[in-house]
Image (cartoon, rainbow, N blue to C red):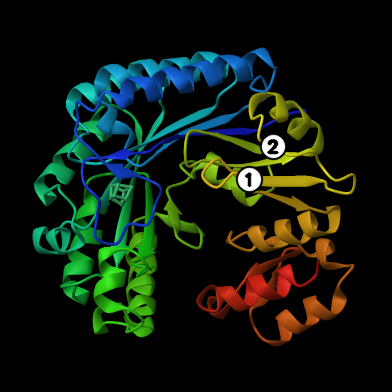
């Protein structure tokens, strides 16, 4: 019975961004529900610890929403409790937004044992930020990244491409500036227009020119080129890091490590023995069918997906291909037709006993992942 990674979801934001379909709610900074939220998470952490679920946990991630919107006092309490509940953590990340990542919050997080801050910068152009519905300015982002780097934290920034008003030049400018700020990790995502969001309502099924596939591919390629030149090396579809700064928590997700999610919009993936223990924690979890070896569920919809051993194996293959290091070739020995087909289509190539995604494999990721999932 073990989990390797813990995720704690904070569902509050200062304002909803125009593209966001994450489980988060815009509210006031003095919303009294935040105190209730804190009490619930602390009670859950205590129960998890009492059930012996956290002793093997190596990484923790406070995500959102906007964890820093909780403010220094609440966030410090929550982070400290996570740190003491998981005595063997080697990495502890917290997501942050520039409008609420003050010097005080940074110092509080560091003192509470947080080792890594992931900052939602998205762009360093004020007009682009405004179009996204972000409430921070480029100067706020520059300032808080600088303070976090100076504080000695492992700093990651999230950037978004193929967004309104963005040009090839403004994208390069954002990348150059982020590199110059000295961050150790960058995540780069093309904007996805999701149903139900203000962008989804405005554009429907029409793809605006600033978001079309060619623009997305060009911006992602530009990011890879500029970041690589600065020793920020791509190690996953959307993730770049300096040596030793890769996100161990996210790598756990992509390598089949069981993880537990706490909070209103958190996902969990557990093996059979840990699921049995988790049923003491979440009384809505149904009994496990005898042939299920992996369980996935989210506290948001309270639905459980039961995977057989074969499905869990196929899922691991698929997730492993998100990483530049790919998977050991031997793991596809049981499905030689799939292996040969992926090689013939140029979606993967051999490298030192492994199968790794090619450039086409990155661009046609959905085809690659679907072929591996079909092996189940
Ligand atoms: S800050 Fe993040 S979670 Fe909150 S609304 Fe914006 S994108 Fe969504």
- Crowding around mark 2 (Cα neighbors within 10 Å: few <14, some 14 to 19, many 20+) is some
- 1 and 2 marks in contact (CB < 8 Å): yes
Quarter in which the C terminus is drawn = bottom right
Left of 301 or right of it: where is 190?
left
In the picture of the structure, the residue carrying the numbered disc 1 is: 297
Of the pair 210 and 274, the residue shown nearer to us: 274
Vertical placement of 99 versus 92: above or below?
A: below
Q: Quadrant of residue 225?
A: bottom left
Query: Exactly how many numbered labels are in the figure?
Result: 2
Badge number at residue 285: 2
Residue 117: horizontal and vertical position, in percent? 35, 36
Q: Secondary structure at mark 1?
A: strand
- Crowding around mark 1 (Cα neighbors within 10 Å: few <14, some 14 to 19, many 20+) is some
Q: Is residue 225 visible?
A: yes
Residue 255: horizontal and vertical position, in percent? 67, 49
Q: Secondary structure at mark 2?
A: loop
């Amino acid at each position: 019975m073990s989990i390797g990674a813990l995720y704690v979801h904070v569902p509050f934001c200062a304002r909803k961004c125009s593209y966001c379909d994450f489980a988060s709610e815009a509210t006031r900074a003095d919303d009294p529900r935040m105190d209730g939220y804190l009490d619930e998470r602390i009670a859950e952490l205590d129960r998890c610890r009492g059930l012996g679920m956290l002793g093997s946990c190596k990484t923790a991630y406070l995500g959102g929403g906007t964890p820093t919107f909780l403010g220094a006092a609440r966030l410090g309490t929550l982070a400290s409790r996570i740190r003491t509940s998981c005595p063997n953590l080697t990495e502890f990340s917290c997501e942050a937004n520039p409008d609420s990542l003050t010097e005080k919050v940074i110092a509080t997080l560091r003192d509470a044992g947080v080792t890594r801050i992931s900052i939602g910068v998205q762009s360093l152009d004020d007009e682009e930020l405004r179009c996204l519905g972000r409430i921070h300015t480029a100067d706020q982002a520059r300032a808080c990244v600088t303070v976090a780097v100076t504080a000695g934290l492992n700093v990651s920034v999230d950037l978004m491409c193929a967004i309104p008003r963005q040009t090839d030049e403004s994208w390069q400018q954002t990348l150059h500036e982020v590199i110059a700020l000295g961050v150790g990790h960058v995540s780069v995502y093309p904007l996805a227009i999701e149903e139900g969001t203000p962008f989804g309502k405005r554009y429907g099924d029409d793809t605006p020119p600033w978001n079309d596939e060619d623009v997305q591919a060009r911006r992602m390629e530009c990011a890879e080129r500029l970041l690589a030149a600065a020793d920020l090396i791509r190690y996953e579809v959307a993730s770049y890091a300096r040596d030793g700064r890769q996100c161990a928590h996210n790598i756990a997700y992509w390598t089949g490590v069981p993880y537990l999610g706490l909070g209103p919009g958190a996902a969990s993936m557990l093996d059979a023995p840990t699921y049995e223990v988790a049923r003491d924690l979440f009384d809505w979890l149904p009994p496990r069918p005898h042939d299920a070896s992996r369980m996935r569920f989210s506290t948001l919809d309270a639905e459980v997906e039961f995977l057989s051993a074969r499905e869990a194996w196929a899922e691991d293959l698929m997730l492993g291909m998100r990483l530049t290091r790919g998977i050991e070739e031997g793991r596809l020995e049981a499905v030689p037709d799939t292996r040969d087909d992926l090689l013939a289509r140029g979606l993967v190539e051999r490298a030192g006993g492994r199968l790794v995604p090619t450039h086409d494999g990155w661009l046609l990721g959905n085809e690659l992942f679907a072929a591996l999932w079909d092996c189940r």
